Amino acid sequence: MKFSTGLEKSNTVDLDEMNPPDDKLHEACGVFGVCLNDGGRDAAPLVYYGLLALQHRGQESAGIAAVKDRNIEVRKGMGLAAEVFSPEAIAQLKGPAAVGHVRYSTAGSSSIENAQPFVSRFKLGSIAVAHNGTLTNADVVRELLEDAGIGFTASSDSEVIVNLIAKNYRKGLEKALTDTIKFIKGSYALAMLTDEALVGARDPNGIRPLCLGKLPPKAGGFPQGKSSPLAEPGGGWVLASESCAIDAVGGEFVRDIEPGEVIIIGGGEVFSFSFSEKTRRAVCSFEYVYFARPDSVIDSMDVYGSRVRAGEILGRESAAAADLVIGVPDSGIPAAIGYGKATGTAFGMGIVKSKYVARTFISPDQIKRERAVSVKHNVIKSEVRGKRVVLIDDSIVRGTTSKWLVTILKAAGAREVHIRVCSPPVRCPCYFGIDTPHRKDLISNGASIPELCKSLGADSLAFISVEGLLESLGATAEKSYCLGCFTGEYPIPVSGPAE
């Protein structure tokens, strides 16, 4: 990538040459399910609103499957949920239970064939599966199923799950789920729909999040104490990747689904069982660093609070003499607030993010990601002019966005730009549902801090330590986290190219 020269002589930036690709890790998807106690109402509208709340987890495709009279119907398409579903399409999805999915592909190509939920119709019934995560043994399982005569219509590893369940369904729902989940390896949070029940499951390490909520007969807490127009009398139950989606439909957060737990909801009752022995809990640390919305709570940890604490710890570890601290919108802002508190540096906006180009990563295709990023961030010149600025970001992946931001901050008149990062250097690939670049494209892989600083054009650069990140997350022996992309140490064995 070629950058405009002579910025020290001029405050102009060549936009034709400064057009970096999106520089964040991206989540695979989000899942949402609803089971209403009142069989006379439809769950699909609630699922639609839940998907809107989870749209940040996947913007490539969206889908909803609903069940009525033992028949599962599905609607899905490419794009945002609001683009895929018209009011007419939602109205066609009848039934008191439904599951939904928003996707960003990590396993399988970007295509309508890989959009979820996947639905299988077989002799004993039907099942729909929405999956967040990545199976590490999907190729082996797929080959075994194909040898048994089972066909596949997509390249996504998620179709492996629905076909395994269908194959084992003659044993009964509980046994089919147990046998399937014990057979697959990797990360998964599942929202599944059968003819008679809504089912949730979480992998034994709890790498991907999943939580349970309740729709009370009359949901209070809405403006002026009015009931939610969504949570009508009768109530029901909700499964969601994040608690913010439960809030969006007027529900009440009940608890997180435990690692290795299956939960079955039907007939107004909730049944739970564990399918594995107790293993090391290893929630993905990047959920707190970047993926999750700040108004979510994951495994009893407030996401916003963890980001503020990370900024405070970063300030203690690597303070810079500066006049202003700013955060890269949006996830860098809470950390910038924390950094300012710890160091006494004034907090300001500095950078504005356009919400209308947030979809620059919709397609994993690199050429498409390179378009329009130059208009994604803009500097408030009056805020930074003549100042020593600390720029707080959640992570540095390829480094292109960081380099771009340093360039435009200095072009806007910042005297100095000091980068501080609220995650350790990303040096290794993820095998559990994150779209990680190849090792060669990870700027921190093999480069020293001084080399990185020079490459980015910053006046100084520092990352939070692994110990500091764990402190921000309240890690204990019982509550640990997956740090594989930082340390190369994974909670379960993985196999893949060295990249």
Image (spheres, rainbow, N blue to C red):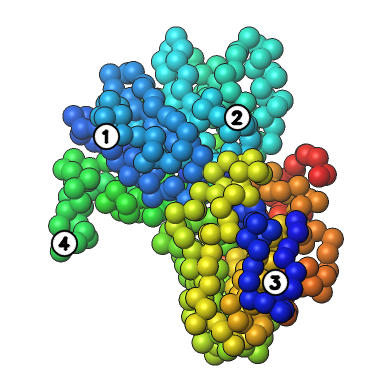
Mark 4 is surrounded, within 10 Å at the Cα level, by few (under 14), some (14 to 19) or many (20 or more) other residues, namely: few
How far is the residue under mark 4 from the one under mark 2? 44 Å
Q: Comparing marks 4 and 3, which lies closer to the viewer?
A: 3
Tag of residue 87: 1
Q: Quadrant of residue 36?
A: top left
- For mark 4, give the secondary structure: helix
Q: Quadrant of the C terminus?
A: top right
**Which residue is denoted by mark 4 in the rendering?**
225
Q: Which residue type does callout 2 highlight?
A: Ser
Earlier sequence position, callout 4 versus callout 3? 4
Whether label 4 touches label 3, CB < 8 Å: no
* x and y, in percent, of residue 281 in the image: 60, 53
Whether residue 232 is visible: yes
Q: Comparing marks 1 and 4, which lies closer to the viewer?
A: 1
Marks counted in the figure total 4
Mark 2 is surrounded, within 10 Å at the Cα level, by few (under 14), some (14 to 19) or many (20 or more) other residues, namely: many
**Which residue is denoted by mark 3 in the rendering?**
463
Q: Comparing marks 3 and 1, which lies closer to the viewer?
A: 1
Residue visible at 38% across and 38% down in the picture: 83
* In the depicted structure, whether residue 102 falls above or below residue 228: above
* x and y, in percent, of residue 117 in the image: 46, 30
Earlier sequence position, callout 2 versus callout 3? 2
**Which residue is denoted by mark 2 in the rendering?**
156
Earlier sequence position, callout 4 versus callout 2? 2
Mark 1 is surrounded, within 10 Å at the Cα level, by few (under 14), some (14 to 19) or many (20 or more) other residues, namely: few
* In the depicted structure, whether residue 10 falls above or below residue 272: below
* x and y, in percent, of residue 321 in the image: 65, 90
